[in-house]
Image: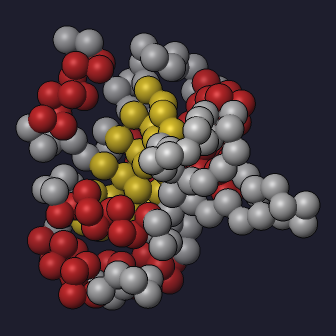
């Protein structure tokens, strides 16, 4: 069975394990949505305080109720970690790291680069990597892919990469 078909089968059977990198105002709600759909979900964040809050069932994000988070933690469908090795055990890795604007109003890609390097170090055949961070066209192709290619795996054959664009946007982050 091809890598793509194997992944599709895991998703259809709700057996795919999903990682969300960055548990801020985009990542935490996404991790909750994924876990609520029944997928085992790992939230990865470099902040020990964020990981502790999430694992304690307490939301640190204003628009996310702890009453929605806590049951997912208690059930084991969602857990948080600051250990990038946990990404290796997942099938899909969704990158939701910040891209603040720098002094000249360009997105600061340092968080995207750091996340891509962490993923590169644990990348394995079958992974789907999705860049969800808001950034400029070309980021996936020009920044993320070259870093992931350093793993020695081949995109489109061994692993897959895509970028999520909001409805109505055109080629954001591609």
* 47 to the left or right of 112: left
Q: Is residue 1 above or below residue 113?
A: above
Residue 36 versus residue 63: which sits nearer the camera?
63
Name the quadrant containing residue 169. top right
In this picture the colour scheme is secondary structure
Name the quadrant containing residue 148. top right
* 8 to the left or right of 103: left
Task: Say which residue appears at 28% left-offset and 67% top-offset.
Answer: 32
Task: Say which residue appears at 13% left-offset and 56% top-offset.
Answer: 38
Give the image location of residue 158, x and y in percent: 42, 18
Q: Is residue 59 visible?
A: yes
Give the image location of residue 55, x and y in percent: 32, 78
* 113 to the left or right of 12: right
Give the image location of residue 107, x and y in percent: 75, 56
Q: Is residue 147 visible?
A: no
**Which corner quadrant holds the N terminus?**
top left
């Amino acid at each position: 069975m091809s890598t793509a078909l194997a992944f599709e089968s895991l998703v259809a059977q709700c057996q795919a394990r999903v990682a969300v990198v960055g548990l801020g105002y985009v990542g935490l709600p996404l991790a909750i949505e994924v876990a609520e759909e029944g997928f085992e979900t790992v939230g990865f964040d470099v902040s020990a305080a964020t990981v502790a809050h999430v694992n304690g069932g307490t939301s640190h994000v204003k628009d996310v109720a702890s009453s929605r988070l806590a049951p997912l933690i208690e059930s084991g469908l969602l857990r948080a970690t600051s250990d990038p090795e946990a990404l290796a055990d997942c099938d899909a890795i969704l990158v939701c790291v910040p891209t603040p604007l720098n002094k000249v109003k360009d997105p600061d890609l340092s968080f995207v680069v750091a996340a891509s390097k962490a993923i590169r170090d644990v990348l394995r055949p079958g992974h789907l990597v999705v860049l969800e961070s808001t950034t400029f066209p070309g980021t996936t192709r020009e920044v993320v892919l070259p870093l992931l290619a350093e793993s020695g795996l081949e995109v489109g054959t061994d692993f897959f990469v895509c970028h999520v664009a909001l409805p109505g946007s055109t080629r954001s982050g591609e």
